[in-house]
Amino acid sequence: MRISDILGMSLANLWKRKMRTVLTVLGVVIGTASIVVMLSLGLGLKQAMMAQVGSAGGLTEIMVYSDAAYGSDDLLLDDKTIEKFSQMEFVENVQPQLIYSMPFQIGNYEGYMDIIGVSQEYLQKITIGEGKYPSAKGEMSLLVGNQMIMSLMDVKTGEWPDFESGEAPNVDFMKTPVIGGIEEGENYSEDDDTTDPEDLLDGVGDNADFSVPEDFSIDTNDFEDDSDADSDADSEDDSDAGFGDDTDFSPDDETGTDDAFEDDWEEENYSYFSDEMKRVKLNVSGITEGDLDTYTDYSYSCYTDIDTLKAFLKKNYSLNAVVPGQPTDKSGKPYRDYKYTQLTVKVDDADNVEAVLEEIQTMGYQADANKEWLEEIEKEFMIIEAVLGGIGAVAMLVAAISIANTMTMSIYERTKEIGVMKVLGCGLGNIRSMFLSEAAFIGFIGGVVGLLLSYSISFLLNQFLAPIFMADMYGVDMNISAIPLWLALVAIAFSTVVGMIAGFFPAQRATRLSPLAAIRNE
């Protein structure tokens, strides 16, 4: 019997029992859709995590931090460190970051910002929603995070509108002037050093005479007269003050002097600015992409060109001033060059990240890589996908039992037909193949329809649930469900194989029927 004949007879037999076939196929549809949708959720979350890692830095980047105490020159991050890392094998380039924190004022609101100086190459990786990138020339300009406005405090009330009312302040970084406060740096001076008492005796001979001369005396009467005069004067001043014995020095309740003083004290503390701070105007060139509900790694920071940030610090701090946030040597003296907060080491290939990371950590630096973190995340997502797939597999197991039941009932109903086929000389393999083909068709049709249903469910999830869930959890605008081509092909193949497995034992039973007994069967 030809394969086409076997397939034709299988389809004809399924069509004769349409209602039973439809119900059995429906079970496979539900099972296939359950598995595909569950796995697509795990894959969607994984892709979102990958996108978040990509926004923070690729798989070939290593972040290096200085974990050294002040005065340990070997572990501070500076231009010498960059040169040392650049000469390492597999390293393409090294990009520094310099962070300077300062208070700022915009309208009636104040906040605190971290200005991160980075290279122009790093700036280009940040997606802009409005404005343009900070320039490498001229005055320092800032690229403000899209959620910086949510960290503002009302100076008049001391309240944060975002926390109190859930509404963002009505200000625009691109239109409203922004004023920054330069904190006064501690000036280093050689005179500030504490003098050792033993240093005072340097140059004094061992025979030096520290005894008191015999004619040395102190006239205590001079001190007594002065003290008496002072006491008399004080008593006269007190008597002339005009206060009687019944004078009440308690706070005046009507004037509310204490309350007014307390209110003034609290109002002064609402502001981040002090009298010693120098106020400077800050230029805002752009705002990062995203609305107030979209969080990214750039949402709460301000970025600028690192060279313009250095020029800004040199302009506002003297050579001997200790810039806030910058380390000092053992004597408390500031370094002549600025020490970086972080270095980003770019490796040529992801396979070489581990070797470079280990070498940097051996030098004593604190370093980590996205690749290490991502590998741990992938292991967790494998567990999540396995659990989700297992939940869907339960529905497929029920569908497989339904297929087996359908095929068993079909064999009982077609016992005489099987006997006739055997008497006419039909081979056992052909009979087995015919029943396996019917089971495979049920699985295949159910897999195709189930896959179409999965795409429909995935579309609805991405259309309505993803904008809420993904933005809040990962800060990226991506789909929550992803069905790649390989998953679609595997789903159809899996449902077909499950159908064949479920129909194997009924088909095997059909081959064992006695031809004579089958013919006599009514």
Image (tube, rainbow, N blue to C red):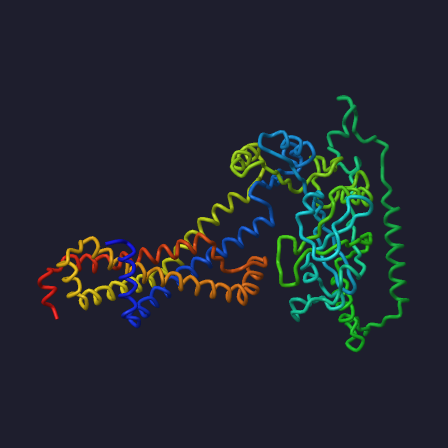
Which of the 4 image quadrants contains residue 356? top right
Q: Residue at x 85, y 37 (%)?
A: 217
Residue 355 placement (x, y as % from top left): 52, 34
Please indicate whether residue 311 sits to the left or right of residue 478 in the image.
right
Residue 514 placement (x, y as % from top left): 10, 60
Which of the 4 image quadrants contains residue 437? bottom left
Residue 467 in sight here: yes
Q: From the viewer's perspective, is residue 312 above or below residue 155?
A: above
Total numbered labels placed on residues in the image:
0
Front-most of 395 and 56? 395
Please indicate whether residue 312 sits to the left or right of residue 501 in the image.
right
Which of the 4 image quadrants contains residue 109? bottom right
Q: Residue at x 76, y 41 (%)?
A: 307
Q: Residue at x 12, y 64 (%)?
A: 518
Which residue ends up furthest to the bottom in the rendered image? 254
Q: From the viewer's perspective, is residue 429 above or below residue 166?
A: above
Q: From the viewer's perspective, is residue 68 above or below residue 125?
A: above
Q: From the viewer's perspective, is residue 54 above or below residue 241?
A: above
Please indicate whether residue 21 sits to the left or right of residue 272 in the image.
left
Residue 194 in sight here: no
Please indicate whether residue 346 sits to the left or right of residue 245 in the image.
left
